[in-house]
Image (cartoon, rainbow, N blue to C red):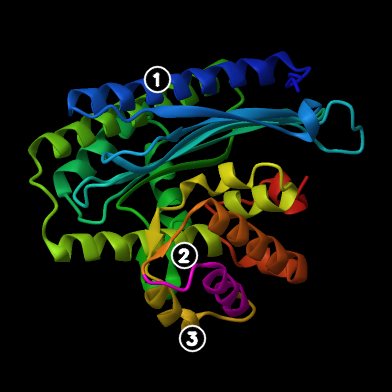
Amino acid sequence: MKRIPAASDTANNAYRMVTGLQQRFVQGLERLAAARGSDQSFRPVEWFRDEGRHGGGVRFEASEGGLYGRGSVNVSQVHYDDMPDKRLGSANAISTIIHPVHPLAPSVHIHVSWTEMKGNGGYWRIMADLNPSHENDADRERFLAALQKAAPNQFDEAKAQGDRYFDIPLLGRTRGVAHFYLEHYHSGDAEADFALARTVGETAIDTYLAILDGVLRDAPAPTEEQQLAAQLAYHTLYLFQVLTLDRGTTTGLMVHDQNDLGIMGSLPARVDRDLLASWAERMPAPQDELLKGIIEALPEENPAAVDAATKQRLAAAVRSHYRTHPEAMEMQASGNVTPPTVRNHS
């Protein structure tokens, strides 16, 4: 099979840009591993949308090792040039999550995407959020300061949108401690918007690598049971937010089932099944049914391993729930607006 590129030059420029961000991050993570005496690397996995007719992508997954417990750096381009009934022309994205093994090392999520609508321009979605299980004020401020420098005119709105998007009302807290999110962003200056997306992506990558390097260089061995327990609890919260509130994840699962492992690449390696179950009685209908399906998809042992087979079951549970309750999409997180591709599952 061969991936057919989009017809749009703008889309292909965006695809080349996010591929460049992917290479920057993967190479940086591998250099950091080598500096820490680890040979852990990232292996490419290619996937195709409709056998390549409508694009596809490549994700880099962390190999087995003691540094990155779960890591995925995904790039994709999906397009519908040959389907005139589709409003969506193309979507080009990098979406990445790194969950380090050491409990004092923060996770990170970065997403940069360009979505092009047929005959109606396009918009950027730019996200970066720092996700520690053990909060560190200096790291949070460093991450936010770097993003503010990268996007001085957009920072206040992006931070406000991010704080809204990653809020978990049921638990009275947010996922992560530093949030940047521009949703449906287009200023009218295409060149400036492209440069902003690239700069924010590069800044988030480079700043996270610097934070991670500092933590791994200075942190003692993770021998404290409390540290590991706090990390497991945070990873459980992370899975809960992704599978019950995150529009991007849900929309990807609803549009097609040809990249479930890639879409679920953001999930941590293990979660606390009992902790998830303890939140069930707080869930409003029909999301209580969704959480029940998520818990049933996990292995019965605790902690529950989130392996490839489990990811497939989780994807099927989420997809089944929203096919039964499409109105529940309105209960998911949003920054300011719901993009048309999300509203219509284009």
Quadrant of the rendering where the N terminus is positioned: top right
Q: Earlier in the sequence, mark 3 or mark 1?
A: 1
Q: Three-letter amino acid code at disc 3?
A: Glu
- The local secondary structure at tag 3 comes to helix
Q: CA distance from mark 3 to mark 1?
A: 43 Å
* Image x and y of residue 217, in percent: 11, 34
For image coordinates 51% across by 67% down, the residue present is 298
Asked whether the residues under the numbered discs 2 and 1 touch, taking CB atoms below 8 Å apart as contact, a structural biologist would say no
> Upstream in the sequence, badge 2 or badge 3?
2
The residue where tag 1 is placed is 24
From which residue to which does the magenta span run?
Answer: 288-302
Tell me if label 3 and label 1 are in contact, CB under 8 Å. no
| Residue to which mark 2 is pinned | 240
Q: What crowding class fits label 3: few (fewer than 14 Cα within 10 Å), some (14-19), or many (20 or more)?
A: few
Given contact means CB atoms under 8 Å apart, are the residues at marks 2 and 3 in contact? no
Toward the right, the furthest residue is 84
Which of the two labelled residues, at mark 2 and mark 1, occupies the earlier sequence position? 1
Q: Looking at the image, which residue is at 21% across and 60% down?
A: 228
Observer-nearest of 108 and 171: 108
Above or below: residue 205 compared with residue 141: above
Magenta-drawn stretch contains 71: no
Instruction: Kindly identify the residue that appears in the image at 45 percent across and 79 percent down.
Output: 277
Residue 244 lies, in percent from the top left, at 54, 65
**Residue pointed to by mark 3:** 281
Crowding at dot 1, Cα within 10 Å, few <14 / some 14-19 / many 20+, comes out as some
Tell me: 22 left or right of 232: right
| Badge number at residue 151 | none
Q: How many marks?
A: 3
Q: CA distance from mark 2 to mark 3?
A: 14 Å
